[in-house]
Image: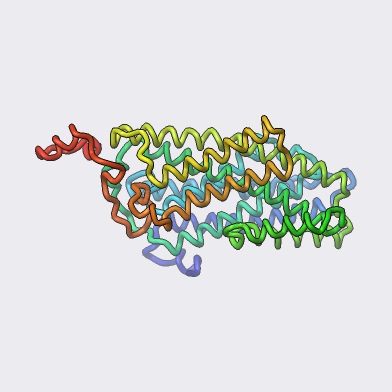
């Protein structure tokens, strides 16, 4: 579906128009980042860029994020509840979280202050985030966007903070994984250029990038983008030296951990909030629902990463591999979960289009609530 045809339709929602406007800003931001890469490939004598080049990519990222936030606000008004019930709404919130996470990391971690060697990687990271936002919005336009009333179990004040924490953590962990993937493709292409690594090591990295699940969504495009960047650097005779690449890999390792450190507390908070919400709604902190189990596995993968890094001293490829494994678990929990056999009876399928949620699937209704329901009264969960 052509987004511009959608934009000029009379029946299109304001939120949908704003999402398309955000895509336009993302496109300009991508071009600005590509221009910035060229200036970094051929810097001025003092190694700096003009101000409009240096801040252009992050400026358009900020404008696109603000536009998405406005679109989410209009969607909130259109559906009359926090817009995270259907998958189209959740993905809209996810693109907002991607933009916010990119801005938080750029400012909080001082990415712009990390020197000339980091600059091209910073631009590549912005390109990847903006491309991810555009393609996610394109996917959203294929989903149902009709307003749906919240089922009783979701009519709780826990709904907004629980979903917001998890979605922001997923976005931040996704960016941390992108940094890890940039690490691997940098190592791969620098090895191809210099021949400093064994062919077995190169083959292992390439196989991991190509054979990783859902490679067509992230890793293969990243390989192509990085190949273009390296080809441009070779044409300009600006390929970084071996020492520069080693320093860059160390910075990638450091920044990926810091990005993880931003997102992990939100993932933990989201799980805790879900448990308290379940106790309030169903008198059961943990029902071993398949989505709960998948989210717990994701959390445990990241806990293992923390132990490997802080106690085992893992750095570089080993630590980055654990981050990528965590991101795969996030993707399974966030997107693939609804297709798994056990998910068909899960209460967390509220976000699936065409699914009619069924209450009480996490176990028997508590005795007092059952007696009250049989006597004609509303259950505690229904009252909310």
Nearest to the observer: residue 332 or residue 220: 332
Q: Is residue 285 above or below residue 30?
A: above
Query: Which residue is farthest top?
Result: 311
At 21% from the left and 37% from the top, the residue drawn is 383
Residue 172 position by quadrant: top right
Scheme of image coloration: rainbow
Q: Is residue 142 left or right of residue 107?
A: left
At 64% from the left and 49% from the top, the residue drawn is 178
Residue 6 position by quadrant: bottom left
From this viewpoint, is residue 332 visible? yes
Query: Horizontal and vertical percent for residue 20?
Result: 50, 59
Nearest to the observer: residue 91 or residue 374: 374
Nearest to the observer: residue 198 or residue 84: 198
Q: Is residue 276 above or below residue 328?
A: above
Q: Is residue 161 left or right of residue 200?
A: left
At 32% from the left and 37% from the top, the residue drawn is 156
Query: Horizontal and vertical percent for residue 42?
Result: 85, 53
Nearest to the observer: residue 352 or residue 139: 352
At 77% from the left and 44% from the top, the residue drawn is 249
Quadrant containing the C terminus is top left
From this viewpoint, is residue 67 visible? no
Query: Horizontal and vertical percent for residue 53?
Result: 74, 49
Query: Horizontal and vertical percent for residue 227?
Result: 75, 61
């Amino acid at each position: 579906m052509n987004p511009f045809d959608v934009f000029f339709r009379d029946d299109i929602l304001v939120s949908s128009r704003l999402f398309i406007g955000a895509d336009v800003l993302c496109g300009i931001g991508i071009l600005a980042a590509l221009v910035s890469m060229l200036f970094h490939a051929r810097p001025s004598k003092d190694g700096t860029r003009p101000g409009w080049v240096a801040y252009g990519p992050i400026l358009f990222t900020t404008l696109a994020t603000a536009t998405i936030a406005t679109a989410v606000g209009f969607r909130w008004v259109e559906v009359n509840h926090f817009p995270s019930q259907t998958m189209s709404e959740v993905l809209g919130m996810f693109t907002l979280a991607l933009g916010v996470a990119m801005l938080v990391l750029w400012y909080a971690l001082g990415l712009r202050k990390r020197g000339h060697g980091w600059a091209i990687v910073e631009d590549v990271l912005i390109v990847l985030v903006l491309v991810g936002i555009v393609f996610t919005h394109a996917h959203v336009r294929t989903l149902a966007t009709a307003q749906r009333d919240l089922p009783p179990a979701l009519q709780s004040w826990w709904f907004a903070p629980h979903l917001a924490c998890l979605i922001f953590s997923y976005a931040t962990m996704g960016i941390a994984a992108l940094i890890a993937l940039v690490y691997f493709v940098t190592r791969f292409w620098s090895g191809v250029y210099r021949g400093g690594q064994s062919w077995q090591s190169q083959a292992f990295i390439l196989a991991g990038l190509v054979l990783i699940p859902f490679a067509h969504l992230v890793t293969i495009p990243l390989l192509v983008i990085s190949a273009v960047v390296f080809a441009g650097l070779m044409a300009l005779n600006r390929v970084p030296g071996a020492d520069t690449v080693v320093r860059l890999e160390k910075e990638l390792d450091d920044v990926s951990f810091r990005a993880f450190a931003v997102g992990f507390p939100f993932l933990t908070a989201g799980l805790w909030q879900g448990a308290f919400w379940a106790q309030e709604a169903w008198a059961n902190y943990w029902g071993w629902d398949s989505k709960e189990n998948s989210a717990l596995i994701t959390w445990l993968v990241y806990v293992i990463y923390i132990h490997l890094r802080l106690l085992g001293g893992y750095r570089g490829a080993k630590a980055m591999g654990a981050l990528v494994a965590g991101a795969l678990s996030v993707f399974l929990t966030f997107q693939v979960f609804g297709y798994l056999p056990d998910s068909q009876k899960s209460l967390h399928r509220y976000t699936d289009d065409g699914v009619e949620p069924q209450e009480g699937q996490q176990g028997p209704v508590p005795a007092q609530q059952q007696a009250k329901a049989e006597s004609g009264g509303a259950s505690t969960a229904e009252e909310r």
